[in-house]
Amino acid sequence: MRSLAFSLAIFAPLTALLLTSGCKRGSVDGGVDRLSGGGATFVDPIMQRWSSEYKTAKNVEVDYKKSGSGNGIQQMSGKVLDFGCTDAPMNKDETENAKTEGGEVVHVPVIMGAVAIIYNVPGVKEQLKLNGDVIAKIYLGEITLWNDPAIAALNPGVKLPASGLTPVYRSESSGTTSIFTEFLSKSSVSFKTKIGISKNPKWPKIGTGQNGNDGIAGHVQRNEGCIGYVELYYAKKSEMPYAILKNRRGKDVLPDTENVAAAAKGAMSETPTKEPYTVHSLTYSLTDIDADTAYPICGMSYAVLFKNQPAGKGKALVDFLKWATTDGQKFAKELEYSPLPTELQTKIAARLDEVKLD
């Protein structure tokens, strides 16, 4: 009994110390050690990398679950998540709905990237050339065969099969779809009238819907005749061929980090004049930019959060976003993204300084 009492006397203080320290994981000032985010699949690859790197550097975990931009906005607005991610700025209705729950919403650009047009054409090994008008007709159901004269005219010398063409699109509310439909609406009056810009458009009764960028990439990879749109990382990961696109100046350009940067430079040199880019500061349309090397289907992914934040959680969130938009940009190119311009990083830091910690 004396031995048992002695053991308890030794281990009780140690147990209490471990339990206490377990409750105070994270920053030494009692700050938060876990953040929750979710939404856009566009940004998921680099967000997972950031989560790992930030855990090592700052001992703060960032749990990010991809679910589509629309869901990210909804979950942030309902205060289920600390922040959401979207590739399309929140529209007026979404902004007003969020305002009733938690006040003003801040948009923070976190990364830029290209949307690639991937395809699986039987017997074709060449890299196809396409333009906005042809892609619009495909998604309107007006082009249904791979050897259609409009596709053939852009690809002289390529033996295109007389086989069916199946467009693949996102089945959930998606910021990548918003970028894609914005480009097509700028390229085709018919597309703008019949479908328009939307995260969740009403597609004609053709093709098939798939969940997430990875869902589209996987479906196109497995099924001959399909064409789809995905963030460049997913095209490279699936090893699917992707199209060369004709930009506004008539130049044939590839989706790569340099051509995304060219689009961003052009976009940031002009003041936004259309919604939703006029609703929120630091939001830009990167589609169909008038510049020699600009790839025409580019976008920014944004973290969205309430401007009024609880002190502990808010400081942790601001610190993470400041890191992601500066030091975290060094991981961009290896994951097929384009890093944010330095001048934009400076503006983001100033915007984050406006977040109120209550």
Image (tube, rainbow, N blue to C red):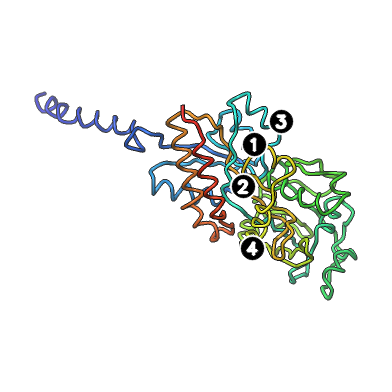
- Near-viewer residue (355 or 198): 355
Disc marking residue 71: 1
Using the numbered discs, state the Cα–Cα distance from disc 3 to disc 1 in whole angstroms: 15 Å
Q: Please tell me whether mark 1 sits on a helix, a strand or a loop.
A: helix
Using the numbered discs, state the Cα–Cα distance from disc 2 to disc 1 in whole angstroms: 14 Å
The residue under label 2 is which amino acid type? Ser
Q: Nearer the viewer, mark 4 or mark 3?
A: 3
Q: Residue at x 60, y 33 (%)?
A: 105
Q: Position of residue 41 (x, y in %)?
A: 62, 46
Using the numbered discs, state the Cα–Cα distance from disc 1 to disc 4 in whole angstroms: 28 Å
Q: First in sequence: mark 4 or mark 3?
A: 3
Above or below residue 354? Residue 347 is below
Q: First in sequence: mark 3 or mark 1?
A: 1
Q: Residue at x 74, y 71 (%)?
A: 125
Q: First in sequence: mark 2 or mark 1?
A: 1
Using the numbered discs, state the Cα–Cα distance from disc 4 to disc 3 in whole angstroms: 34 Å
The residue tagged 4 is 256
Which quadrant holds residue 37?
Answer: top right
Q: Nearer the viewer, mark 3 or mark 1?
A: 3
Mark 2 crowd level (few <14, some 14–19, many ≥20, 10 Å Cα): many
- Near-viewer residue (173 or 186): 186
The residue tagged 3 is 93
The residue tagged 2 is 301
The residue under label 1 is which amino acid type? Asn
